[in-house]
Image: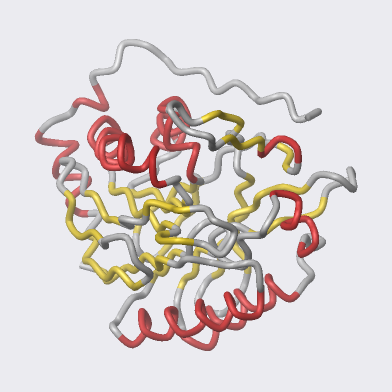
Amino acid sequence: MTNVAAIQMASGPQPQANLLEAKRLLKEAAAKGAGLVVLPENFAMMGMRDGDILKIAEDPDAGPLQGFLAEQAKRLGIWLVGGTVPLRTARGDRARSACLVYDDQGRRVARYDKMHLFDVRIPDGDEHYAESRIYESGDHIVTLDTPFGRMGLAVCYDLRFPELFRGLLDQGAEFVAMPSAFTAQTGQAHWDILLRARAIENQLFMLAAAQGGFHVNGRETYGHSALVDPWGRVVAQLGRNPGVLIADLSCDCVGRIRKLFPAVHHRRLACEIEVPDTEG
């Protein structure tokens, strides 16, 4: 068994205030014995307008947000999935929403760029989002070996695309770390269902860290950060407000379930991973 943690925040438009809150919650998670901690999507800023996030975009491998994540991982001796950080691209009006992973020595060991961008209108409401106006899509799925098992990476809206998780499964993922910021309405309708579905159909753990609560920009996010096991059981879950979820993750459970109930080996159809158009 390994203690893992999901950090839930209600980030605002001031990066320094968000970093102070993240630092406090990371310290709490480490004090409770977590060896792996996941921050939510956009942990460093939820701006007043969509384009505000570009103001804090950084060059890859350089910048205060990346420095903060590396420092916290090393200081606390934890593996840290750094939510998402906006990283600059060749286009000045676009960034990549990058999920960065640091080991317990503060070294960056993985980068996943969010593949599916949230361009939607919420039914029966006034909310609409167009992430493609500020972000480029990623074009690679990412898994990596960790002391806790083989980890896959996904971000928020990715949860709705089962073919991505089949790809992570085919790369050996035993659990998926998923920073998120689901809206209150879509979270109420689909969050638990989708988390459990991805866990069940791929027979792996889902460790989801969410934004949760009311934000200064008027947005409301769903929260309910959770750890779901390969049988679809919710091992632990938070409510709507910021906090720290601590739970036990054992990848031995993954192998046992896959052996006793070998659904992942009974597949008859291959799943092709199509590279998205990144021209925006």
Q: In the rendered image, which quarter is residue 72 located in?
A: bottom right
Question: Compared with residue 99, is residue 232 higher up or lower down, i.e. above or below?
Answer: above
In percent of width and height, residue 253 lies at 17, 51
* Residue visible at 45% across and 67% down in the picture: 9
In percent of width and height, residue 175 lies at 34, 49
Describe residue 91's horizontal placement relative to residue 50 as left or right.
right
Kindly give the residue lying farthest to the top in the view shown: 268
Kindly give the residue lying farthest to the left in the view shown: 260
* Residue visible at 25% across and 39% down in the picture: 196
* Residue visible at 61% across and 83% down in the picture: 71
Describe residue 95's horizontal placement relative to residue 25 as left or right.
right
Describe residue 257's horizontal placement relative to residue 188 as left or right.
left
* Residue visible at 46% across and 31% down in the picture: 167
Name the one closer to the observer, 105 or 274: 274
Quadrant for the N terminus, please: bottom left
Q: In the rendered image, which quarter is residue 266 located in?
A: top left
Quadrant for the C terminus, please: top right
Question: Compared with residue 183, is residue 194 higher up or lower down, i.e. above or below?
Answer: above
Describe residue 5's horizontal placement relative to residue 132 as left or right.
left
In percent of width and height, residue 216 lies at 56, 64
